[in-house]
Amino acid sequence: MAEKESPFDIDDVSQLNDVPQEEEAEGSVGSREVALLTVRTFTVFLLVLGGVWLCLKVFRRRRGSWKEAGLAVSIQIIWQVLAWYSRHIDANWVLHLTSGTVDSETTRKVFNFVENLFHALAIYTGMAVVGRLAGVVGTLLWIFCGMSILAPLVFAIIILLLDLSLNAEDRHAFATTIGVASGKMVILNLLPLGMLICWLIGHCRTRTTRKSTRELASTIISGVLIVFHLVNIAQWIVYVITKNTDSFELKVALVDVDVGLIEAGYLLACLAIPWAWFIGLIIPIPGSSQETLNVNLKLAKQNKTRNIVKYKKDSDKSKPIVATPPTSPQKFSPEVTSSPSVHSQFSSPLVNPTPMSDILPGEKKSKRRSYMEAVSNSSINVLENAPPRQSKSADPLWLPSSKPVEL
């Protein structure tokens, strides 16, 4: 049996000249991919530069927390860097997430989970920043913070469960792709857009006084975020039309529109945070004296350090030793009292023969003598010779007398 001929069973290399060859090698990067990579790289660079300037501006102003600004900008940077790597770097050069192996599929699902998580965190963190700069405090601010954590987790976990439970055919089916895109649009675009519009209308109607720089930054950020969500909703509409149409010309025309709206969405996200925040802080507000405010803040900072009372507890050695007054050298006697008495006319108080010099300061003093001891040590002669202070009757008047009463 004759052997089958294969394309490599040739005798002369010149026979391959008739084989058509592609102009570009497989996996090469064309001009379109280079343009998209340049635009996305510029967006990431602009985001990092604006984040650094914003943190320095907030730190130098001493009003607001530069850590909060750094946290919000860091979430934005992580999201955009992950999207930049997966759509441009790995898709054209690394090919680790799209190689088709089992390990690459698992890695791609985990990578998509992290990217979706930070995407949703960036969206809802922007809303929390808008409320924070506008002066929202208390329960409403905690609601914003809780929503910024809960909603991204729910969204990312749902997409991860779909990737793990469905096979490749069901996951990329028409109904699944449209459902996932619609749910993503509702959670990440439609719901935040409605909240931003309601907040902006209510804030503009109730706020009549002059705005501060932070409130101005909040208004600018909310305006840019509204445009960002509108662009993403328009991109979702184009995506749905592309999936539903059968016209090849329409699909080719809408591909560039879809890609352009995606890149515009990333650029608007970069312009909202941190650039809109930074521009709102540097715009001078007419009628406001920033120099006077800065002087008052400096004076308040100086007074804060001046008014601190430095209390230092002295040690026992540094305290002056104050001797306890000694006990009275005189013995207690009835004739020595606080009021003048008859006994003082006949006698003089007895002096304790022990001198005061014998009592050392560190010696423990004895307790006060009892009254009976004081009376027993007193002069009995003086007590007997003392005249009575008041005459007393022999018997009390209310008791019956033993002597008969003569009338």
Image (tube, grey):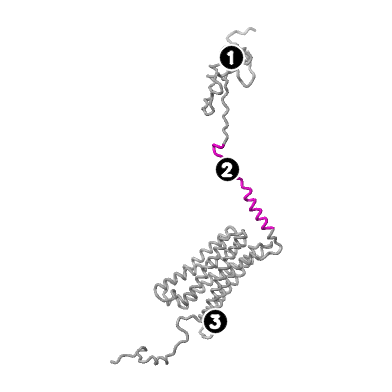
- Closest to the camera, between mark 3 and mark 2, is 2
In front here: 45 or 372? 45
Camera-nearest label, 1 or 2: 2
- For label 3, the residue is 254
Dot 3 or dot 2: first in sequence order is 3
- Residue flagged by tag 1: what amino acid is it? Leu
Residue 377 colored magenta? no
Q: Can residue 168 be seen in this view?
A: yes
**Nearer to the camera, 88 or 395:** 88
Q: What residue type is labelled 3?
A: Leu
**Crowding at mark 3 (Cα within 10 Å: few <14, some 14-19, many 20+):** some
- The nearer-to-camera label among 3 and 1 is 3
Residue type at mark 2 is Lys
Sequence-wise, the earlier of marks 1 and 2 is 2
Q: Residue 156 carries which label?
A: none
CA distance separating discs 3 and 2? 77 Å
Count the marks: how many? 3
**Residue beneath disc 1:** 399
Q: In this view, does 39 lie above or below 1?
A: above
Secondary structure of the residue carrying tag 2 is loop
Please state the horizontal and vertical placement of residue 280, each as a whole percent of the image.
63, 66
- Whether residue 202 appears in this view of the structure is no
Q: Find the distance from the CA under tag 1 to the CA under tag 2.
A: 73 Å
Residue positioned 53% across, 86% down in the render: 249
Could you tell me which residue is drawn at 54 percent across and 73 percent down?
41
Q: Name the residue under label 2.
A: 312
Q: Which quadrant, please, contains the C terminus?
A: top right
Label 1: few (<14), some (14–19) or many (≥20) C-alpha neighbours in 10 Å: few
Q: Whole-percent x and y of residue 166?
A: 42, 73
